[in-house]
């Protein structure tokens, strides 16, 4: 016993284990230390003896070993001996499948991706977590890997289309990264017919000897059924779309009106003529605004629905809100973060009813600088539900019929517009980047298919509200930063050194320079954008500049928001539809009460999760829009359109069609008899023999030759090139016409601020 105690007492993490467990086991670190010290794989019985694990501890100790296996710290060899991963030169990572059958291992440690051959991919599905060993170098010079062990299976259910050949039934997954056909077990078709879209539960995962096998658990319907594209996207991206019973029950138990008990500790601002300004189809109104002149500037009041009053940390609604992360706005359908009783009811700032809100009350100088501000919970009463179109009309025609019918509100809207002009000047002074993009909206037939796609014209009312929300978000970040309270900041980092070098090389061909040296600021981008405005190649240059920047995300560590030019920025203004905003509200309330807010999970974990759910929602909406556009383009087979090269790849170029805002591919094999070299830095394909160049921003005519609904791909062939006399002088900045990047518009006209 003494010997056991002496060895266990050498565990450097013994105190930590004692704090966490009544009967502490050897720590993971100490187990690895002992295993490494043996210099060879160790059998489990031998390890039990080495660490003097007693009989009553064996089950718990085995659980710890299994957890270490799952986390890739140890593994068992063919003789079931325990090996230390670091000694085996094994790499843990996630499998990323490719539609063509091969794949990649994305290492957990951040090292370069490793190629997985089609043979290796037979053992796994996209998303699985595996251990690999480098087996060589592929023909492109990439490290090639061999799968040693599958640690975690990512796919329990798969949505796909049912096929039958020679009496054998199988599913082709909607997620094209799952390239293997999944066999349907005999008698497990669930009544589905060939060609239908189904959900399959995997019974047997693939290995090197066998295909995956499953059973059909849900029949969604026929491929072309109205709304099927959304049903597929929900399951393909594993989006929670049905509220659990406990969350529904909690939502229904909340009284539908503001009660007397809800008033405690709140300021009454029902006398302020607050109004909501949103898109025509919006149903959840989470922000209301009011503005009035005051000494030295303006008073701006931004009132935001007080969701945190109704959704408490770790209750049923909160747990579901974390899972969803955000509302998802599909064309014609919304998957809300919160049940409709809250999202469209009690937490929506509907007109002519009392509502609870959190207020950011600001003084903004006549130069557009934010001065003093304060946050407080209150009760408000929206005086009107206005749309962007209505506000723009009233501002443009103050003597018009609409303005006269809203005579009591009009002066406040005019004050808002005056303040907006000041905030725009401050934005320019700050150096925020203002990329010009085109948002689009799909107009549908009664059958649920696209009738046409139209651009959404952004007027001053859109930008006015955006500036008000930016101001409130900045105040929220400043307030929590000042009080040293952890929160999820909305961070946006500048370009990576590699992307910056590529951008400078590209700009150099046009005789342009980006200022700022090795660390350019947003102002340097803004200055360059301003200098190229009006050039025929403005759209091309803007697109390349935009693509040099990184993606915004949520993190507890504040590194500022590069694009907006803010030292600290967070999301405060949309707690109905974004979970990070709800966390910010809770943190502000905690500070107001002199406390610290501790969320249900660690801040860093929440940041990574919310960033993931945002990307997941974007991917799902892209899938739905791509399917709808494919269905729309089936009626245009053989038609000729004019468009712009929107992206260049090593396998061809994507063309965005004028007026239709639909994108398709001209494959490299359709570019003529030549070998084309892809130049990523110059965003071009260059013919070796002919010298023919195809570049981002070029104007072309194309013919629609194929629309594949299953892969949601549209294929074009070149029908002609829109020439200019100086076309071959594109190196000097003379491309034909600007390229415009069509941004994906959100149903309901919801505002997105950074």
Image (spheres, grey):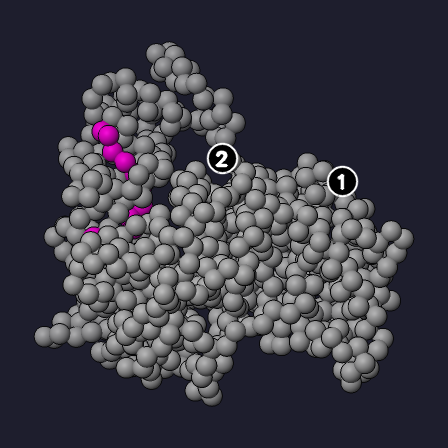
Which residues are the magenta region? 88-102
Outermost residue toward the front?
725
Q: Residue at image x 52%, y 48%?
A: 553
Outermost residue toward the bottom?
446
Q: Residue at image x 34%, y 31%?
A: 61
**Can residue 654 be spotted in the picture?**
yes
Quadrant for residue 164, please give it: bottom left
* Image vertical order of residue 181 relative to residue 118, above or below: below
Mark nearest the camera among 1 and 2 is 2
Outermost residue toward the left?
166
* Quarter of the figure that contains the C terminus: bottom right
Q: Percent from the top left, x then y, of residue 662?
A: 40, 72
* Quarter of the figure that contains the N terminus: top left
**Can residue 587 be spotted in the picture?**
no
Quadrant for residue 50, please give it: top left
Residue identified by numbered label 1: 594
Residue identified by numbered label 2: 518
* Image vertical order of residue 477 relative to residue 328, above or below: above
Let me know if residue 276 is in the magenta part.
Answer: no
* Image vertical order of residue 42 relative to residue 525, above or below: above
Q: Residue at image x 33%, y 20%?
A: 33
Which class describes the residues within 10 Å of circle 1: few (<14), some (14-19), or many (20+)? few
Q: CA distance from mark 1 to mark 2?
A: 42 Å
């Amino acid at each position: 016993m003494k010997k056991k105690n002496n060895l266990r007492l050498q565990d450097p993490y013994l105190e930590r284990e004692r704090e966490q467990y009544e009967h502490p086991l050897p720590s993971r670190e100490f187990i690895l230390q002992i295993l490494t010290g043996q210099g060879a794989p160790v059998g489990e019985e031998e390890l039990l003896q080495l660490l003097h694990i007693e009989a009553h501890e064996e089950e718990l100790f085995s659980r710890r070993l299994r957890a270490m296996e799952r986390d890739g710290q140890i593994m068992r060899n063919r003789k079931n001996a325990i090996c230390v991963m670091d000694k085996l030169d094994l790499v843990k990572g996630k499998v990323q499948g490719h539609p063509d059958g091969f794949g990649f291992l994305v290492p957990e440690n951040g090292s370069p991706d490793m190629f997985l051959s089609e043979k290796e991919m037979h053992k796994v599905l996209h998303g699985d977590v595996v251990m690999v060993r480098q087996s060589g170098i592929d023909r492109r010079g990439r490290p090639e890997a061999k799968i040693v062990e599958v640690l975690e299976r990512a796919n329990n259910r798969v949505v796909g289309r049912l096929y039958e050949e020679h009496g054998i039934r199988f599913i082709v997954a909607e997620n094209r990264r799952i390239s293997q056909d999944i066999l349907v077990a005999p008698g497990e078709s669930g009544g589905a017919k060939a060609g239908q879209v189904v959900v399959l539960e995997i019974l047997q995962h693939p290995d090197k000897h066998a295909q995956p096998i499953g059973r059909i658990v849900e029949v969604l319907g026929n491929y072309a059924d109205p709304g099927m594209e959304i049903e597929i996207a929900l399951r393909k991206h594993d989006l929670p779309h049905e509220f659990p019973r406990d969350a529904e029950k909690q939502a229904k138990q909340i009284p539908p009106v503001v009660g007397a008990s809800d008033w405690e500790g709140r300021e009454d601002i029902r006398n302020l003529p607050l109004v909501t300004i949103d898109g025509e189809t919006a149903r959840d109104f989470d922000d209301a605004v009011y503005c009035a002149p005051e000494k030295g500037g303006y008073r701006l009041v931004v009132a935001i629905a007080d969701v945190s009053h109704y959704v408490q940390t770790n209750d049923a609604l909160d747990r579901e809100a974390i899972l969803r992360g955000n509302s998802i706005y599909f064309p014609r359908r919304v998957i809300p973060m919160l049940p409709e009783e809250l999202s469209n009811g009690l937490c929506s700032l509907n007109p002519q009813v009392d509502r609870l809100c959190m207020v950011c009350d600001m003084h903004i100088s006549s130069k557009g600088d934010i001065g003093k501000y304060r946050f407080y919970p209150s009760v408000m009463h929206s005086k009107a539900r206005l749309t962007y179109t209505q506000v723009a009309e009233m501002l443009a025609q103050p003597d018009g019929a609409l303005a006269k019918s809203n005579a009591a509100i009009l002066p406040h809207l005019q004050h808002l517009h005056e303040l907006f002009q000041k905030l725009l000047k401050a934005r320019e002074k700050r150096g925020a980047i203002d990329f010009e993009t085109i948002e689009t909206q799909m107009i549908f037939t009664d059958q649920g298919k696209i009738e046409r796609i139209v651009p959404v014209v952004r007027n001053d009312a859109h930008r006015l509200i955006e500036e008000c929300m930016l101001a409130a978000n900045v105040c929220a970040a400043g307030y929590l930063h000042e009080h040293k309270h952890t929160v999820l900041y909305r961070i946006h980092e500048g370009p990576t050194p590699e992307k910056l070098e590529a951008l400078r090389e590209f700009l150099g061909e046009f005789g342009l320079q980006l200022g700022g040296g090795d660390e350019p600021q947003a102002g340097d981008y803004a200055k360059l954008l301003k200098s190229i405005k009006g050039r025929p190649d403005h759209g091309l240059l803007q697109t390349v500049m935009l693509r040099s920047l990184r993606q915004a995300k949520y993190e507890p560590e504040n590194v500022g928001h590069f694009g907006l030019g803010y030292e600290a920025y967070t999301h405060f203004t949309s707690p109905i539809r974004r979970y990070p905003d709800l966390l910010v509200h809770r943190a502000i309330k905690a500070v107001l009460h002199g406390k610290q807010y501790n969320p249900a999970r660690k801040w860093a974990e929440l940041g990574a999760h919310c960033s993931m759910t945002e990307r997941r929602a974007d991917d799902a909406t892209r899938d739905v829009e791509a399917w709808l556009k494919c269905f729309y383009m089936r009626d245009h087979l053989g038609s000729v359109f004019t468009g712009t090269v929107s992206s260049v790849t090593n396998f061809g170029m994507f063309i965005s069609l004028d007026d239709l805002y639909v994108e398709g591919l001209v494959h490299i094999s359709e570019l003529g008899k030549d070998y084309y070299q892809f130049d990523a830095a110059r965003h071009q394909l260059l013919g070796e023999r002919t010298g023919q160049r195809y570049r981002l921003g070029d104007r072309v005519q194309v013919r629609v030759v194929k629309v594949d609904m299953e892969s949601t791909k549209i294929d074009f062939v070149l029908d002609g090139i829109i020439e200019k006399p100086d076309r071959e002088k594109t190196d000097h900045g003379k491309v034909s016409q600007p390229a415009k990047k069509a941004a994906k518009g959100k149903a309901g006209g919801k505002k997105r601020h950074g």
